[in-house]
Image: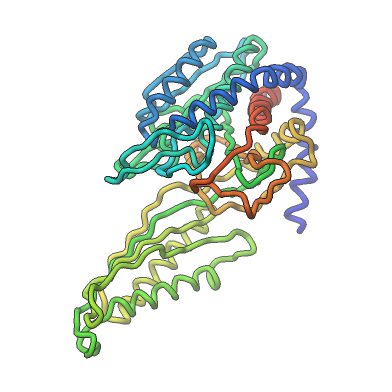
Amino acid sequence: MKKLLLPLLIFPIIGTGAALAQSSLRPAIDSKANAIESKVVEWRRDIHMHPELGNQEFRTAKKVADHLRSLGIEVTEGVAVTGVVGYLKGGKPGPTVALRADMDALPVTERNDLPFKSVNTATYNGQETGVMHACGHDTHVAILMGVAEVLASMKDDLEGNVKFFFQPAEEGVYDADIAGAELMVKEGVMEDVDAVFGLHIASQMEVGKIGYRSGPAMAAVDNLEITLTGRQAHGASPWSGIDPIVTSSQIVMGLQTILSRSVNITENPAVVTVGAIHGGIRHNIIPEKVEMIGTIRTFGDDQQALVHKRITEIVTNIAESAGAEVDLKIEKLYPSTVNDPALTAEMLPSIQATVGEGNVISMPPITGAEDFSFFQREKPGLFINLGGMKKGGDPSKTPSHHTPGFYIDEGGFTLGVRTLSYFVVDYMGKKK
């Protein structure tokens, strides 16, 4: 308990005094954010109606680029395929702060009956599908467009510079080895950045609330592939073969001991899920081969290394004991999203200032993953959750992310604009 209480005690001490350095800009931010609320809603509805998959966000990128140029912001297009980067030079010297919004939608067919319901379809991995902003990236884009408008209107008062990252392919793409934030970082967008901030709308958190977590906040995600090769045999005489089905069953059970016996779950959770097993074609034939695929979720590099080590040991040893050959592949996708503790402490007063202390939620780790983590690997970063569920809603009855019924209440958009804007001016105020 002491480890949990100490950060809460020091947050206001570290952050409050420093944050006051630019508190004079907060009333102007509030006024400007309120004034453009209807524009932010309109942008979001338009983007929601015309969703685009990863690395195909051409219409969205053009809308963003045109808006940034209209504000006098320097624009670079075609970053990491379809990304847009805006650069706003402040009127006074200071640090460079990056803000990020992801632009891509998902291969999901929308079921909501909305006047701005998605109208797009696409081919994804060889299959025709509806396309939907089923994770709220449309809201992220609209909110950051609003932040750009607010900050551009007060650029002479900014004590530093702002970079706006409109990122493609956060959800990944099936036909490229590197995409999204990882590719943006590789192309150098973080080289002149001092700190980076982002937010994610949360369909099961009430509008008017903000969630945060210091340290590991979202999981690293890795793909797991296991191919077992035995010796085919007649089902009536299993002793004449090497059964990869039985071996795969033992592996599935063995993998569960990693979580129950190897991971210290009092510190952080972990997940090892086998999502599919394919093997065999007939009742009375023991097949030669079984293929398994799954997902791994961990928090922090040390835990990830431990879980990978135990998977390798368990899979290899069980296969060997059965006399089967095994091909094990673990593909690292996104690292854990880790909010820099010092930066989180500094910026907590900014969050509290936008929404009030009673509406700030210290969240448990989330086993979902985010490629915002690639930005955080380069410079200190903070990633927060913004409430998007209607007031009084029941989270257990509210459709979750990545589902056809995913829905966001528009009442929290202005709070998102204000919070990201506060992050910029308060961070700059601390560094002057």
Horizontal and vertical percent for residue 255? 45, 70
Looking at the picture, tell me which residue is in the foreground, 372 or 191: 372
Between 257 and 132, the residue placed more toward the observer is: 132
Which residue is found at the position 39% from the left and 70% from the top?
Answer: 313
Q: Residue at x 27, y 80 (%)?
A: 243
Residue 427 in sight here: no
Report the label total: 0
**Residue 430 in which image quadrant:** top right
Relative height, residue 377 to residue 149 (above, below)? below
Q: Is residue 81 visible?
A: yes
Using the rendered view, name the quadrant where residue 158 is placed: top right
| 81 displayed left or right of 372 | left
Q: For the point 65% across and 42% down, which residue is it?
A: 389
Which of the colour schemes (rainbow, by chain, secondary structure, one colour) is used? rainbow
| Quarter residue 327 falls in | bottom left
- Coordinates of residue 121 in the picture (x, y in percent): 36, 37
Residue 113 at what x, y percent from top left? 53, 39
Quarter of the image that includes the N terminus:
bottom right
Relative to 422, residue 284 above or below: below
Q: Residue at x 53, y 28 (%)?
A: 45
Residue 14: % across, % down = 76, 36
Instruction: Look at the image and tell me in which quarter the C terminus lies.
Output: top right
